[in-house]
Image: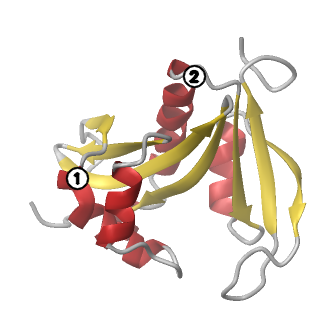
Amino acid sequence: MGTKAKDVTAIITFRDMTAADIKAVVAIEAESFYDAWNENMVLGEVNNDLTHYLIMEADGETIGYAGFWLVAGEAQVTRVAVIKSERGKNYGTRLTAALVNKAWELDAEAVTLEVRESNIAAQRAYLTCGFASEGIRPNYYEDNHENAVIMWLYRRGINSNE
């Protein structure tokens, strides 16, 4: 399938990422991040026992992916990305929600991430999923020394829906 835009009636599904997804993930990386991962880096993530990645598909076509490292009960989000042609359709929020559900399935007690201070759309998606801003990492991003907003979501407690 090509990269044609999906309509609002697309069937969205989520599944675990495999090595067969590497080329699609690398393409999304290239249009999403200044420090895009190459095929070997993505393969390393697929083969790492601490990582968990989801693929988001619309009518069977990969339109996004997200993942985290699960260490000592904390899921550290590494990436959340949607292909450029599908942005602005709430897919980032849906992908984040699926990722959080995966973390809870794996008995994580908390999920954390850093997001660019200027990336308001991503921050809105994370807030919609229940995350709260907990601080700033000054000069976090190497490309322009932009600050990162540190966000947390706890399975139980003040930020929880349980």
Based on the displayed image, in which of its 4 quarters is residue 136 positioned? bottom right
Query: Where does label 1 land, which residue?
Result: 19
Based on the displayed image, in which of its 4 quarters is residue 131 positioned? top right
- Give, as a three-letter code, the residue at label 1: Ala
Q: Which residue occupies the foreground of this view, 34 or 49?
A: 49
Q: Decide if residue 83 is in sight here.
A: no
* Disc 1 crowd, CA 10 A, few/some/many (<14, 14-19, 20+): some
Quadrant for the C terminus, please: top right
Q: Decide if residue 113 is in sight here.
A: yes
Q: Residue at x 18, y 43 (%)?
A: 59
Above/below status of 90 relative to 38: above
Q: Secondary structure at mark 2?
A: helix
Q: Residue 119, percent across and down?
A: 68, 67
Check whether the beta carbons of the residues at disc 2 and disc 1 lie within 8 A of each other. no
Q: Report how many numbered discs are placed on residues in the image.
A: 2
Q: Which residue occupies the foreground of this view, 6 or 74?
A: 74
- Give, as a three-letter code, the residue at label 2: Trp
Quadrant for the N terminus, please: bottom left
- Left or right placement of residue 98 versus residue 111 in this view: left
Q: Secondary structure at mark 1?
A: helix
Q: Which residue occupies the foreground of this view, 19 or 64?
A: 19
Q: Residue at x 71, y 58 (%)?
A: 114
Q: Residue furthest left?
A: 1
Disc assigned to residue 134: none
Q: Residue furthest top?
A: 162
* Disc 2 crowd, CA 10 A, few/some/many (<14, 14-19, 20+): some
Q: Residue at x 44, y 52 (%)?
A: 89
Sooner in the amino-acid sequence: mark 2 or mark 1: 1
Q: Residue furthest bottom?
A: 144
- Left or right placement of residue 23 versus residue 154 in this view: left
Q: Residue 111, percent across and down?
A: 68, 37
Query: Where does label 2 land, which residue?
Result: 104
